[in-house]
Image (cartoon, rainbow, N blue to C red):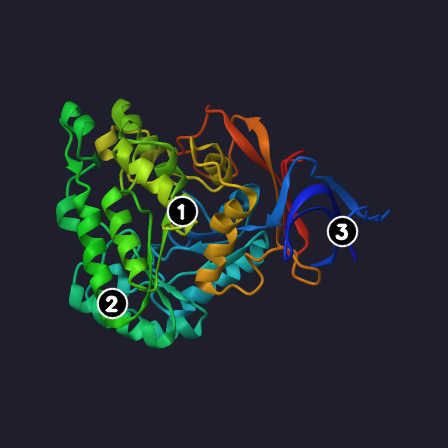
Amino acid sequence: MDSVLIVGGSVLSSTGVVSADVLIVGDRIERIGEGIKDETARVIDASGSWVGPGFVDVHTHLREPGQEWKEDIATGSAAGAAGGYTALVAMPNTDPAIDSGHLARFITGRGEEAGLVQVIPAGTLTMGRRGEQLAHLDDLWAAGVHMFSDDGDTVADAGLLRRAMEYIAQLGGVVSEHAIDPGLARGGHMHEGTVSSRLGMTGIPAIAEVSIVARDLALVELTGVTYHLQHVSTRGAVELLAAAKDRGLPVTAEVTPHHLAFDHQAAAATDASYKMMPPLRESDDVVAVREALKSGTIDMVATDHGPHASHEKDVPFEHAPFGVTGLEWAAAVVNSVDGLGLDQETFFDRMSLSPAALLGLADQGAPLTEGAVANVVVFDPGATWTPTETLSKSRNAPYFGKEYTGRVTATLYRGALTYEMESGR
């Protein structure tokens, strides 16, 4: 069997952070310890690096089926592996939407064919994401779907959402909400604030997020469903989330790298690389989400990797679609955010452990243990670099040309080396 020896790293193990080597034989972690020798192994030098469980993204748009010119499961998996990911949850706002079991199985199968990361399908809450009738929830559950979302749209009908929550609570699944009130957001292109006012552009107010979060948390209290709040962008949503957690409600939340890194001033030049939903917010909102991630009020980082082809983004800001890519740079951005300063254990918790725990992934997101499946990332927190290229089909990212500190140098999925910085794989 092939073997890989990771030497000289700071390892997040089941006994805590230790200075150790990690020997991987086949698809398993064979040994963790100092001074391991294996003359047949491929050696990865992890000096100065953090070694831990591969990252898990609970919010990725892989665009397949239906929009393969933007991305497909193979190219999205390659981008994910380059970013240190060993598991990606594929959002169901495809064409057709993933509202039935056979479509979920298609996603799983395509991920296995690519073989670079574990691709986990999310299913819709409503048929076709139209918000009119429930999706085939039983059928999706039988196909292995545990997360349900009409991502890209909020379920505006509170009665329908309540029925979905009640049913999914019985199944034991997760409702993952894109919390943006469609009426308040209608016609908006960026945050409603000084920048949108100066540009004379219709804005999306913070209350569009806050009002839906308040409604949803009331329904969570009523139904008892496990609820996951996507891409938190406002201080108001953070405050509601903290209060819900204090009351013991079963809620989790994510923040994206771009909402940690930028505020609405970045959109002032109307570069569509900074057009996303929810939009970039005020500086005090950015401070709030950073503090919430650090404290654990926000549980995890999720990329909301949203690829669009160049011809779709290279248009006036008002006509460009929402969305930015982020799989390859998420860890570097999180590590570089001013004032965040996550230590190794907290970093892996937010990038790997918490997202894996949300979905109960058996072989993902756990401290490294002898005998466990080898889903592993090597991350150098001190490396400085400037992204210039991507393995995605799309380049709609706000990170190109900016210097970041922290870089993934190797990723192993089920023991196979799926990315190594030196070779560009």
- Residue 221's label in the rendered image is 2
Residue plotted at (36% across, 45% down): 292
Distance from Cα at disc 2 to Cα at disc 3: 46 Å
Task: Work out whether mark 1 precedes mark 3 in sequence or the reverse, and give the earlier one.
Answer: 3
Which residue occupies the extreme front position in the image? 246
Which residue occupies the extreme right position in the image? 39
Which of label 1 and label 3 is nearer to you? 1
In this rendering, is residue 44 above or below 156?
A: above
Q: Quadrant of the N terminus?
A: bottom right
Going by the numbered disc 1, the residue's amino acid type is Ser
Q: Residues within 10 Å of mark 1 (few under 14, many from 20)?
A: few
Q: Position of residue 73 (x, y in %)?
A: 49, 51
Tell me if I can see residue 303 in this picture.
no
Distance from Cα at disc 2 to Cα at disc 1: 23 Å
Residue plotted at (55% across, 33% down): 406
- Residue 33's label in the rendered image is 3
Going by the numbered disc 3, the residue's amino acid type is Gly
Q: Nearer the viewer, residue 406 or 25?
A: 406
Q: Position of residue 278 (x, y in %)?
A: 27, 43
Q: Quadrant of the C terminus?
A: top right
Q: Position of residue 137 (x, y in %)?
A: 33, 72
Q: Which residue is mark 1?
A: 295
Q: Nearer the viewer, residue 307 or 203?
A: 203
Task: Work out whether mark 2 precedes mark 1 in sequence or the reverse, and give the earlier one.
Answer: 2
Task: Work out whether mark 2 precedes mark 3 in sequence or the reverse, and give the earlier one.
Answer: 3
Tell me if I can see residue 400 in this picture.
yes
In this rendering, is residue 401 above or below 75?
A: above
- Circles 2 and 1, Cβ within 8 Å, touching? The answer is no
Going by the numbered disc 2, the residue's amino acid type is Glu
- Circles 2 and 3, Cβ within 8 Å, touching? The answer is no
Q: Position of residue 118 (x, y in %)?
A: 54, 57
